[in-house]
Image: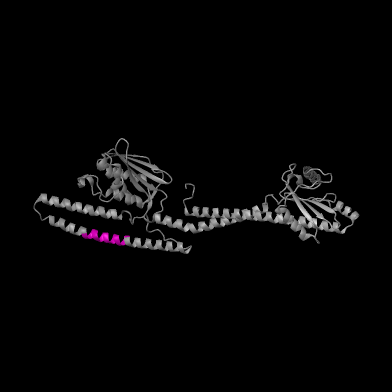
Amino acid sequence: MKWLPKSLFGQILLALFAGLLAAQAVGVWLILDERTRFADRLLGTYAAQRIAGIASLLDAADERERARLVLALSVPPTRISLDEPWRRPEQPPSAEALMFSGLLERELTRPHELQVLSILLAHPGRPRVGRAGLRPLADKSDEPVQSVGSEMRRKLERESRHRPGKRLGRRPLLLVVAQIKLADGAIATFRHALPQAPTDRPLRLMALVAITGITVALLAGWSVRRLTRPLTTLADAATGLARNLDRPPLAESGPTEVMRAARAFNTMQRELKANLETRSQALAGVSHDLRLPITRAKLRLEQLSDAQVKRSIEADLDEMEQMIANTLEFLRAGSSGEAFVRLNLNALIEGVAEDMEALGANVQVRGRAGAPLNARPQSLRRCLANLLDNARRHGGSAIEITLLDSLQRVEIRIEDRGPGIPAAECARVFEPYVRLEPSRAKHTGGTGLGLAIARAIARAHGGDVTLENREGGGLCVLLTLPRTADV
C-alpha cells in the first residue's frame, strides 16, 4: 500500500499506534457498557427498595394515617394511589416485569400479592405501552393509558421547573407501575419514574484515556526511535563504506542485536581495509617486478643492429609499460591515499582544458563554481583528463564543458559532436578493458580503462559518471560531485 510508511521506524510506530488505538477503543466501550449495566441495576434496586419501604409503612398504618402518608410520600420520582382497582393482565408478564417483581418480593418485609407494569416513554408526548405486555392502568378518572402517560409527563414537567438542570420531560423515562395488595386488602398503586442510564459523555474517562494514550504513544515513539536509530547509522555507514574505508568505527552499544551488527560491521571494515592494503602492497611489488625486466629488455635492444625491429620492440615495450601503469591506476582509483583538500574547481577545469587544447582540441567552458570543493586534486584531475581525452579521441576536436553549481552538488557536463554510442552500451563501456572500437589499436581506442578509472575516482568522491546521447548527435558525459559527501 502506497500510504504505508517505508521506514522500519514508521512501520513499527504505525503498528503500535494502531494496536493502542484499538485497545483504547475496546477498553472505553467495555467501561461504558459496564457503567450502563451497573446504572440499570442500581436504579432498579433503588426503585424496588423505595416502593417496598413505602408499602411497609402503608401496611402498618390505619386508614386515616395511610391517607396522610400517601399525600406526604407521593413526591417525585414516586406517585402513590389507593383508589385504583386491581387489574388482571391479558398476557403473561415480560421478563423485565418478572425481574422487577422478584426485586420487590425480596425487599418487602412480608409476603404480598403484587404485579408490575412498565411503560417506556421514548419521547415527550409519544407514550407507548412498554415491553411488559399488560394493559395500561387507568388513573382516578378512568382515562385511557395515553392520558395516564400524558398526565404523568405533565406533572414531571411542572415539577422540573422548580429544579435546576435539564427538564425531566426532555429525556426518555422508564415508568414502573406496580400494584401491591396490603394486609387489609387495600390496593396501593405505585408509579415510579426511572431515569435511563446516563447518556452524557464521560469527559473524565475520555480525558483519562486520552492522557494515557498520548503518554504511551510518546514513550513508544521515543523507544522505537532509540532502537531504530542505530540501524539508520549502520545503513549510512554501509553506504559510505565504499567511499571511505578509513571512517571511524561504529559505536558498539544499544540492544544485543544492534551491538552484534555494529561489531560485525566494524570487523568487516577492518578486514576489507587489511585486504586492500595487502592488495596494494602486492600491486606495488608486481609493478616493480614488471618494470625491471622491461627496462632490461630496453637496454638489450641497444645491441640490435636492425633499426626497424628495434623500433617495433620498443613500441611493444612502451605499450606494455603503459598498460601496467593504467591497470595500477585503475586498481588504486577507489582507494587513493591522497588527502581531501579545499579545491578551486574553476582553476582545475581550466588547467585540464588547456592541456586538451595543447593536443589539438577546441574546448569551451561555461559556468563557474561558486565555492571551493572538498576533493582529492590529483585524482579529480585524472578523472577530468580521462573524460576530456575520451571526448577528443572519439567526438572530434570541439568539446563543450558546462559547470552547474548548487548547494548539494556540482555537475560538470562534457559534450561533443561525435557519433555517440548505442544506448545499450552506455553502462557497459565503464567496465574494465571494454572498447567499442573493434580494431583494438592503441592509437584509436587506448586500453579500455579510461572511463573505468574516471568512474572509480568519481565514486570515491561520493559522485558518479553517466553517459547519454545528445540530441542532434554526439555524446554527453555527466560528472556529479556532491558538496556534502561524507568522505
Q: How is the image coloured?
A: one colour
Residue 385 sits inside the magenta stretch: no
**Residue 282 inside the magenta-drawn segment:** yes
Residue farthest right in this picture: 64
Looking at the picture, tell me which residue is in the foreground, 381 or 394.
Answer: 394
Q: Tell me the quarter of the picture where residue 98 sits.
A: bottom right
In this rendering, does residue 355 appear at all? no
Q: Is residue 229 left or right of residue 115?
A: left
Residue 223: x percent and y percent?
A: 53, 58
Magenta-highlighted residues = 276-289
User: Can you name the residue that lies furthest to the top here?
Assistant: 472
Q: Residue at (37%, 46%) from the top-left corner?
A: 480
Q: How many marks?
A: 0
> On the picture, is 348 further left or further right than 298?
right
Q: Position of residue 61 (x, y in %)?
A: 88, 58
Residue 213 placement: quadrant:
bottom right
Q: Is residue 446 visible?
A: yes
| 435, 52: nearer the viewer | 52
Would residue 336 appear left or right of 157 to someone viewing this image?
left
Percent coordinates x, y for residue 484 in the rendering: 42, 50
Q: Residue at x 33, y 45 (%)?
A: 466
Chief SS of the magenta region? helix
141 or 385: which is nearer to us? Answer: 141
- The image position of residue 367, as x and y in percent, is 37, 40
